[in-house]
Amino acid sequence: MKDTTAVLARSITWAGSKQTYYTARLLVDKDLVNDFYRAYAYFRWVDDIVDADPSRDAPGSNDIPSLSDDDRIAFVRRQKELINRLYRSERPDDLVPEEEIIADLISHDRGENSGLQSFIRNMFAIIEFDAYRRGRLISQQELTWYTDYLGKSVTDGLLYFIGNGHPYLTTNNRYLAAEAAHIAHLLRDMLPDTADGFVNIPREYLEAHDISPEDVNSPAFRGWVQYRVEQARDNFREGKRYLDELDVLRCKIVGYWYCTRFEGVLDTVERDGYTLRAEYNERRNLSTWLKIAWLGVSVTLRHIAHQRFRDS
């Protein structure tokens, strides 16, 4: 029997990120690949709807509708209630195809309070926050919360889909690599996000230095960008200490690839003197893909050496 949600999820993932698609095929637990695609596809769909600017056509090839503010909030409330009902084993009859994806995903959840549930609930909390914050300034406390939740969601999801059931370490640096990636992500998307009404620099800093979110060339703005780059670098350093201790090689490789993807953004920001660009094209460079390929080899070799040393 054809698994319609798996087919749809694979097509959305393929259209959204070829790197994510192939990473799942190669490194996610074989019996969880389709659920990984479901997780990516559902949140890609929800995020695209929340981010779509009603003043212009939505980007992408999936015909994502642009909603008014009221309709966007209504959409988010529907999805939140749907997730809650699905975790109570209540499956509504009026689901659209993308909602069937999350219904099937949750029905496959392996255990109470799993890494999958952490991924789903924390990722949705972030998207819900985005739906309400559009057009207003963000506070420092909210920005910290934003990054903390993203780090927990991504990491717990990764540890669920790769080496499921393995007793991964719970340490203070468990989420730092993903938090660092999110800081770099927000810097990368700062200019287009600001144009779309999502401001990623805290209100307190703007007010203290009498600048606006558009003053990216000002010394004060560049000073804040430098601080965020240094913060991300520190978190990457500590986060990789956690990755180095992982016993599951596939998870370690994906973790390092994830870090490298965003460390390249930080390198460019530093070279530009902390003046942000409207677009970063590092992933399209051949040198980036060669670096990622070599990184997989080097991480594997270090992992083998580490295991042999520990077992000797």
Image (cartoon, rainbow, N blue to C red):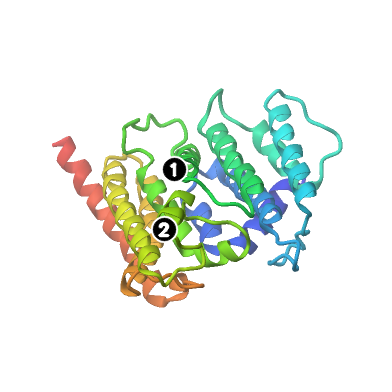
Question: From the viewer's perspective, is residue 233 above or below residue 28?
Answer: below
Identify whether 283 is placed above or below 202: below
Q: Name the residue rendered at 39%, 45% in the picture.
A: 251
Instruction: Give residue 153's position: percent from left, percent from top.
Output: 50, 40
Q: Residue furthest left?
A: 312
In the picture provided, is 4 more to the left or to the right than 147? Answer: right
Query: In the structure shown, which secondary structural element does the residue marked by tag 1 occupy?
Result: helix
Q: CA distance from mark 2 to mark 1?
A: 14 Å
Where residue 266 sits, quadrant-wise, is bottom left
Q: Quadrant of residue 173?
A: top left
Q: Residue at 30% across / 41% down in the picture?
A: 242
Of the two numbered discs 2 and 1 on the same chain, state the one appearing first in sequence: 1
Residue at 76% from the left image edge and 42% from the top image edge = 100
**Which residue is the extreme one toward the bottom?**
286
Q: Is residue 35 above or below residue 222?
A: above
Q: Quadrant of the C terminus?
A: top left
Question: Mark 1 = which residue?
Answer: 144
Numbered label tally:
2
Image quarter of residue 80: top right
In the picture, the quarter occupied by the N terminus is top right
Along the line of sight, which residue is nearer the eye, 248 or 79? 79
- Asked whether 179 or 305 is in front, the reply is 179
User: Disc 2 marks which residue?
Assistant: 184
Local crowd at mark 1 within 10 Å, few (<14), some, or many (≥20)? few
Residue 292 in sight here:
no
**Residue type at numbered disc 1:** Thr
Q: Label 2 sits on what residue type?
A: Ala
Mark 2: secondary structure: helix
State the image coordinates of residue 20 (x, y, percent, origin top left).
Answer: 53, 57
